[in-house]
Structure formats: C-alpha cells, structure tokens
Amino acid sequence: MPRGSFSGVVSSPKVDFIVDMGHPLLNLTVDGFFKIGAVAAAKVVAEDTYDVVKRGSVSQHNFEHSLKKMCKEGAYWGTVAGVYIGLEYGAEQIRGTRDWKNAMIGGALTGAIVSAASNNNKDKIVMDAIAGGAVATAAEFLNYLT
C-alpha cells in the first residue's frame, strides 16, 4: 500500500522581552511570572469570548468581571510559575548540574508550597507535591524530545 509523508516546520512568532533585575534568579522568576501570567489571562479572554458569543450580548458588568478574572488568574498562575522557575533554578545552583532532577525538585516544592498556602491538609499537600514533581518531570522529558 502506498504511503505518503509530510515534512515541514511550523513556527510561531516569538515575543520576548527582558526585565533585568540584576540577578539571574530574579530575571528568570519575573520572566516566568509575566509569560505564564499572560497565558492565563489569554485563557480567560478565550473562555469569556466564547461565553459572550454563546449568550449573544455583552454588558459593562460582564466586561469588568472578565477583566478582574484576567488579572486574578494571571497573577495566580504567574506566581506559581515564578515560584517553580525560581526553585528549579535554585536546585540547579545548589546541585551544580542541569538535569531533569531539578525540574522534579522544583515541581515538588512548588506543589507543596501552593497546596500549603491554600489548605492545611497534610495528605493533600503531599499529594500535590507528588503531582507537581511528576508534571514538571514529564514536561522536562517532553522538552528533551523536541
């Protein structure tokens, strides 16, 4: 049976900005905060746009609610990303090597910190630490594949 294949490169425009805080740890943390915060805000825009199209109307109250939700989600996810990036960088500096273990350490610590800040159930904190470490490690492995 004949087979065909497609070969090509798909790329998207790259938007980058640099905020120099005077230290690589701070630079990476702030950069992660802004980039992931912007993704979270864009997610809210997409969801609320879908809701407006489905409903067929928009009001000033809905617009203000969407704007507040964008800021809240952006700040939350930006903070989580900043904490993760800072902890991963810190693990790299302490261990003196750059590998998947830093992602695992950063993810586990971030999961535990975020969970501890939002609840006081010890089992939930441990489970969130495990999940954070697993997700960060999987993301790091996927990054190596590309």
Image: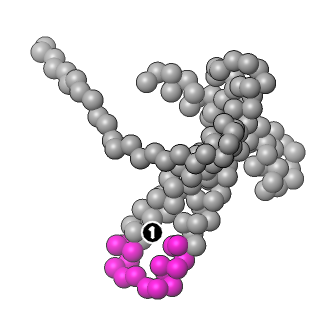
Name the spot of residue 51 as percent of width and height, x first. 42, 71
Label 1, on which residue?
48
- The stretch drawn in magenta includes residue 9: no
Look at the image and give the residue range highlighted in magenta: 52-67
When the figure is inspected, residue 129 is found, relative to residue 75, above or below; the finding is above
Q: How many marks?
A: 1
Q: Residues within 10 Å of mark 1 (few under 14, many from 20)?
A: many
For mark 1, give the secondary structure: helix
Main secondary structure of the magenta stretch: helix
Give the quarter of the image for residue 119. Answer: bottom right
Quarter of the image with the C terminus in it = top left
Describe the colour scheme in one phrase: one colour
Asked whether, in this view, residue 113 is left or right of residue 80, the answer is right
Q: Residue at x 42, y 62 (%)?
A: 46
Asked whether, in this view, residue 7 is left or right of residue 56, the answer is left
Q: Which residue in the rendered view is the most extreme toward the bottom?
A: 60
Name the spot of residue 142 as percent of width and height, x first. 51, 26
When the figure is inspected, residue 99 is found, relative to residue 121, above or below; the finding is above
Q: Residue at x 20, y 25 (%)?
A: 6
Report the amino acid beneath label 1.
Asp
Name the spot of residue 41 as percent of width and height, x first. 51, 60
Name the spot of residue 66 as percent of width and height, x first. 51, 73
